[in-house]
Image (cartoon, rainbow, N blue to C red):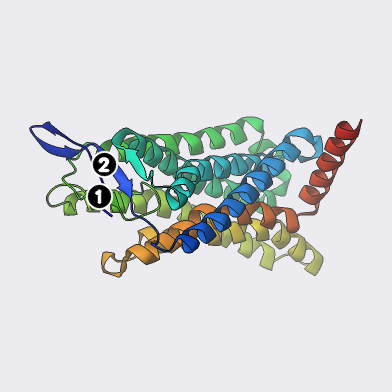
Amino acid sequence: MSLNCSLWQENNFSIKRFAFAKFSEVTEQCFLLFTLILLMFLASLTGNALIAFAIWTNSVLHTPMYFFLANLSLLEIGYTCSITPKMLQSLVSEARGISREGCATQMFFFTFFAISECCLLAAMAFDRYIAICSPLHYATRMNCGVCTQLAIVSWGVGCMVGLGQTNYIFSLDFCGPCEIDHFFCDLPPILKLACGDTSHNEVAVFVVAILCISSPFLLIIASYGRILTAVLVMPSPEGRHKALSTCSSHLLVVTLFYGSGSVTYLRPKASHSPGTDKLLALFYTVVTSMLNPIIYSLRNKEVKAALRRTLVKREVLTHG
């Protein structure tokens, strides 16, 4: 099916409106994927909202670890909301177009929330490092002011990188085709639509991705290296088990997030294909956001207890 894409002239032609490629010509496949993504999206929103609300309303969870977890849940909500609604519309509607401004806005918020999450996961690892390696100084080193500053830096870095990357990409001219062979306005598929040789632009985007993804990851590796060293010298098995259990959920979330993100953005260009990129995009945008609240609620007794108390309160208020 041909796509109607508007062009405007300013020194040369540039695309004013894009359109997302159709997932499949088989309607049943599109509706099946729509249903799966919608269910995961709703599960992600519900789970992350419940965790954030439970932490906010239960004073026993007003600690640095849960403060960062609440921020992570808010980031996950923003992360999925920035792309999933348009993705769902494109799957079942012929209105698959998106304006240049709309595409830039989607790219900004996606990059903003993704980079902020990278930084926040590093802050969470640092929190666990202080808690296990310097437990006597934990209360002073991870006080309210320090936690707030770490959260602000995480959100701030994400905002600056999102603005910089989006402005850099959309300062280019787009000659066509206008079809984005992806589910949303991600950096690599948009760069493919730019005019002329974009190899320098791709290198710049790759360098920023290396810095913004690898730097927090190296901080996480360093933190857990020190944690592992401290745990191995603990005299009691119970102490080692307790220390490691407080890190297991975070480690699993880091593995899911960084694993899928690294495979998507840091693998060689020759191995990229639209089908693989779309599957990976679904995993790191929708699936991981759905799994994170499940991981933290199933593996953390305090979060499970807080969620039960929150649900009981809502039920009492509803029937009261």
Q: Which residue is mark 1?
A: 191
Q: Are marks 1 and 2 in contact (CB under 8 Å)?
A: yes
What residue is rendered at 82% in x and 42% in y?
A: 311
The furthest residue to the left = 11
Q: Which residue is mark 2?
A: 169
Q: Does residue 245 lie above or below 94 as drawn?
A: below
Neighbor class of circle 1 (other Cα within 10 Å; few <14, some 14-19, many 20+) is many
Residue 24, quarter of the rendered image = bottom left
Q: Does residue 27 lie above or below 95 as drawn?
A: below
What residue is rendered at 45% in x and 52% in y?
A: 91
User: Residue type at mark 2?
Assistant: Ile
- In front of the other: 226 or 40: 40
User: Residue type at mark 1?
Assistant: Leu
**Residue 199 image point, x, y percent:** 18, 54
What residue is rendered at 12% in x and 32% in y?
A: 9
Residue 236 shows in this picture: no
Residue 112, quarter of the rendered image = top left
Q: Earlier in the sequence, mark 1 or mark 2?
A: 2
- In front of the other: 169 or 229: 169
Neighbor class of circle 2 (other Cα within 10 Å; few <14, some 14-19, many 20+) is some
**Residue 237 image point, x, y percent:** 79, 69
> For numbered disc 1, what is the local secondary structure?
helix
Is residue 147 toward the left or the right of residue 84 in the image?
right
What residue is rendered at 80% in x and 49% in y?
A: 302
- What is the distance, in whole Å, between disc 1 and disc 2 at their CAs? 7 Å
